[in-house]
Image (cartoon, rainbow, N blue to C red):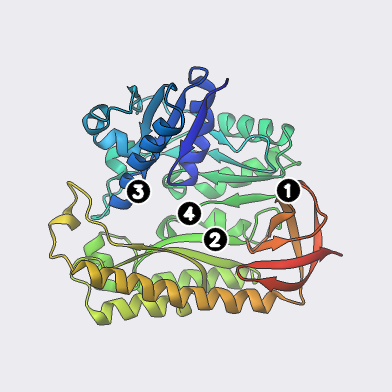
Amino acid sequence: MSAETITLGCRLNFAESEVLKARAPDGAIVVNSCAVTNEAVRQTRQAIRRARRERPGARIIATGCAVQLDPQAFRAMPEVDEVLLKDFDRPAVAAGFRQRVRSFVAVQTGCDHRCTFCTIWQARGPSRSLTFEAIRDAVARELDGGAQEIVLTGVDITSYEGGLGPLVARLLAALPGLNRLRLSSLDSVEMDEALFELLPDQRLLPHFHLSLQAGDDLILKRMKRRHSRAESVTLVERIKTVRPDATIGADLIAGFPTETEEAALNSLKLLDDCDIIAAHVFPFSPRPNTPAARMPQLERELVKARAARLRDTAAKRRSAWLDGLVGTTQRVLVENSAKGHTDGFAPVFIAGSKRGDTGLARITGRTQDTLVGVFA
């Protein structure tokens, strides 16, 4: 029996899990942990305990960001047989979701920034970029294996050494068969001019997920972010001017320490001002050994309420966006079980379609958060 993985957290974790799965002993269960919030750490522990209950004889290996930050705590868990720590000096190209039509390829890991709420730089070390050759070869292998869409991922891909734009340009030039290239989360302040020049290229898919975190200047400063609210709005305007079909996603934190109601409303209004249709909202979670954990905290119920308000408003905006797509024709890639996504990353169900089907689809309706369509 081959090894299996349980993955929590980001797309980079999912990509890395494929490498871990290939290297783990047969029959082992590798739990790849997340440390972005206290809840993520709790879910990691829960996943380990569940794995032990369901597979009492399996060897359980704990790894990932939460384990990296507190290895002793995971070694102390009776369910854990082995703790596997990262080697910061040996970043590996990770290609995830093999045998699927969308595959994630890591281009870098680690982070050189010190946002006051974040521990990921402690868990993953400084930013290290993979060579172009290693990335090109990984993408080529995924395409040869049947992948039709590649997602470039990492902790901070816009910090790629030499620039993300030049990397994307070289990949598109070197791999004519790379017809669908998608980018994972982008740090807006690091988007280079070469990347903006590539935005009109139809091989670069038009959904851009931005690490915005807040829409209030004072909170952004206390987060130690390197952009202002106005810069976020201007960036989105620039993207949409160059690529009118672009859709915008964003990470937002609700209830950051010292956040006033006015500041919270500034973040709420950012949903409209940046035309965000895919918001990942995180209630602030004080992480150990971070400056934000030492700042004056808001009441937990207030943090949850502000997160709920953000999510509710974001859900209404997303619903209106999906409604607006009904009656249009969209390019779609079917990933599994007749389900796929448009280029702008709207989920679509196309009855009778199969994995790997792609083409223009007429959107005929929607059910909850999924569009319904038929291939034209």
Please provide percent x and percent y for residue 110: 37, 39
- Labelled disc at residue 185: 4
Q: State if disc 2 and disc 4 touch (CB < 8 Å).
A: no
Task: Judge whether residue 342 can be spotted in this image.
Answer: no
Alpha carbon distance from label 3 to label 2: 24 Å
First of labels 4, 1 by sequence position: 1
Name the residue nearer the viewer: 331 or 130: 331
Alpha carbon distance from label 4 to label 1: 20 Å
What's the residue at 33%, 80% (across, down)? 265
Q: SS for tag 1? A: loop
Alpha carbon distance from label 3 to label 4: 19 Å
Which kind of residue does numbered mark 3 sit on? Ala
- Labelled disc at residue 208: 2
Name the residue nearer the viewer: 206 or 339: 339
First of labels 3, 2 by sequence position: 3
Name the residue nearer the viewer: 43 or 298: 43
Please provide percent x and percent y for residue 179: 73, 48
Residue denoted by label 3: 40
Please provide percent x and percent y for residue 255: 26, 68
Q: State if disc 1 and disc 4 touch (CB < 8 Å).
A: no
Which kind of residue does numbered mark 2 sit on? Phe
Q: State if disc 4 and disc 3 touch (CB < 8 Å).
A: no
